[in-house]
Amino acid sequence: MSGFSPDDKAVAFKVAISATISFAIMMVDFVWLMRDEVKYVWLRLRTSWTARIYMLTKYTGLVSQIYNVYFTVRMFLGVYTSPRGCRFWFMYQAITVQFLLLFAEGLLMHRLYALFLRNRLILVMLITFALSQVVSMWVSTRLSFPSNKHTVTCLMVRSNPGNAFFSATTMTTNVIIAFMTFWRYFRLPVKWTRGALGRVVLRDSACSLGAITVIMLFLTLSSLEVFKFAMSGNITYYWLICVLWVSIGRIVVDHEKLRDEGEEGEGNIWKGTLQLTSQIEIGENELSLDTRCGSSDGRTQTSRTLSSPLSMPMSKANQRSSSSACTGDSPQKWLGDRSPSCGDETQHSSEPSCTVVSAEVSTCRLSLPNVRKSNGDAPRAKDRPRADAGERTHSSGSSLASPRSSSLEATLSEAPS
């Protein structure tokens, strides 16, 4: 511990200004999101765990930054602080940063886990990354505290190289999360990535991870004394708290806002009990979100539905296109409703469907309701006689032939193709 010189007072003044600016940015973001916070977060505290995370981190981070500004002003005024008080101050900053960092990266990892469709290997890897963050922060704190050089006002004179261990592991984890997010994003169906949710996921992940990585890179270089200036060891944690705080708020509010807009667009199906799950329609080749419910030969064709823990409301256009292809237009089918879907064997249309064979002859097929039979009783379609299938051919200029008129049927059957 050293004294407090006029140069130290000048540095403390700059540190106080920097902390005040970061707090002002947080207040601007707080006011900016206040209306959305009341609408999408406060009313869902009992039903949404992301809303509870938002409230916990939002006001905890805000109070901690207020205390940071107070302490920097106290340093500028030259108020004496005991070594034990300085130790508590550094521990307080480390705990606050780790608290916000865990929730910020936890939300990003949760999205990544959803993008990989609940892959357990991905989950284990993400949990390992989160635990490594906690361990690295604890090791960095233990290495830094005994050898930190500071003034009597707790102004850092020289940063400890042990801080580089925490910043390097955090930066590596962020780079891996960013790579996995972008890699999976560009491998998902184009209709999903170009939708509203796809753009929000890409934007929030890129901005949050990019800002955190830049600050961690600065902390690593300053801890290793690659570049030196008096404020390097004093301003990093204030701005890191600001970035983490803003990132958490934006991720949660954008998520809840997009989710609410998607639900209100289809009849206000939000009832306060829906979990953060959704269904992504992945086709057989996983290249399109379109699902085709029937084929030309009369057989039903269904797509594989995979669920993910991320709430992924589709856009109105995609919902209409998907629901119009199926027999049911209820939006609850996208939320795990087990009502009869378009792939059921017992549901068939009773309306006749016509297929043009040539320019002169067309074939009409009357689809009657079928009763589910056993495998031994159901005859094959190709072995069924032409007359039993109910098929009738007629000229394109004439009306439908009556099934009672066998002579007219024979005449039309011999029409040139």
Image: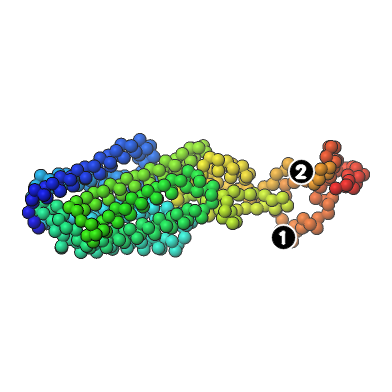
Disc number placed over residue 404 in the picture, else none: none
Write the residue at 22% across / 50% down: 235
Residue 357 seen by the camera:
yes
Q: Amino acid at mark 1?
A: Asn
Q: Residue furthest right?
A: 407
How far apart are the two marked residues, 1 and 2, measured between alpha carbons?
Answer: 28 Å
Label 1 crowd (10 A; few <14 / some 14-19 / many >=20): few
Pointer 2 local density, CA inside 10 Å: few below 14, some 14–19, many at least 20: few
In this image, 140 relative to 330: left or right? left
How many labels were placed on the picture?
2
Q: Residue at x 50, y 37 (%)?
A: 265
Residue located at (55% from left, 40% from top): 317
Image coords of residue 180 (percent x, y): 43, 58
Q: Is residue 243 above or below residue 166?
A: above
Q: Is residue 182 left or right of residue 71?
A: right
287 vs 235, left or right, is: right
| Residue with the mark numbered 2 | 354
Between 316 and 377, the residue placed more toward the observer is 316
Can residue 276 be seen from the camera position used here?
A: no
| Quadrant of image for the N terminus | bottom left
- Residue type pointed to by label 2: Cys
As drawn, 395 above or below 285: above
Q: Secondary structure at mark 2?
A: strand
Assign a secondary structure to mark 1: loop
Give x and y (percent) for residue 150: 13, 56
> Which residue carries the number 1 mark?
375
Q: Position of residue 84 (x, y in %)?
A: 11, 56
- Circles 1 and 2: CB distance less than 8 Å? no
Relative vertical location of residue 92 with respect to residue 38 in this rendering, above or below: below
The residue positioned 27% from the left and 44% from the top of the image is 59
